[in-house]
Amino acid sequence: MNNLTDIPNEEFPLNYAEYCEIRNKIVSAAWGFSNLGTAVGKQIDRELMEVHEKLGHVWETIRNEERREIERKADGVSICAR
């Protein structure tokens, strides 16, 4: 298993460009449902925005792990994947 910082960008399971694309599609879909002006549309909007928030948390988890790996490498600490 690789450390996150060892994975080339083009092979990374969720790189920044993909994250942004998914995020933008979720927001666009949420707006579309909200603009229907129906109760179910508003509910779908809220649920999609919850997905958007969770995606943001996932991205922060990825970035935090990358930062930890970079800091460990800078400190000369072995960072074998867990």
Image (spheres, rainbow, N blue to C red):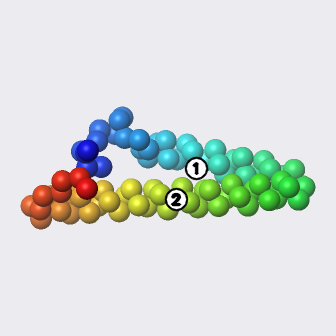
Residue at the left extreme of this rendering: 76
* Figure quadrant of the C terminus: bottom left
Q: Amino acid at mark 2?
A: Gly
Q: Tell me where residue 66 appears, x and y as whole percent.
A: 30, 56
Mark 1: few, some, or many residues within 10 Å (few <14, many ≥20)?
some
Please give the residue where the numbered disc 2 appears in the rendered image: 56
> Along the line of sight, which residue is nearer the eye, 81 or 77?
81
| Crowd around label 2: few <14 · some 14–19 · many ≥20 (10 Å) | some
Picture residue at 28% right of the left edge, 42% below the top? 7
- The residue labelled by disc 1 is 23
Which of disc 1 and disc 2 is earlier in sequence? 1
Q: Is residue 65 above or below residue 17?
A: below
Q: Residue at x 64, y 44 (%)?
A: 25
Name the quarter where the N terminus is drawn: top left
The amino acid at mark 1 is Arg
Rendered image quadrant of residue 2? top left
Q: Secondary structure at mark 1?
A: helix
- Please give left or right for residue 55 compared with residue 81 in the image: right
- Please state the horizontal and vertical placement of residue 35, each as a whole percent of the image: 84, 52
Contact between labelled residues 1 and 2, with CB atoms less than 8 Å apart: yes
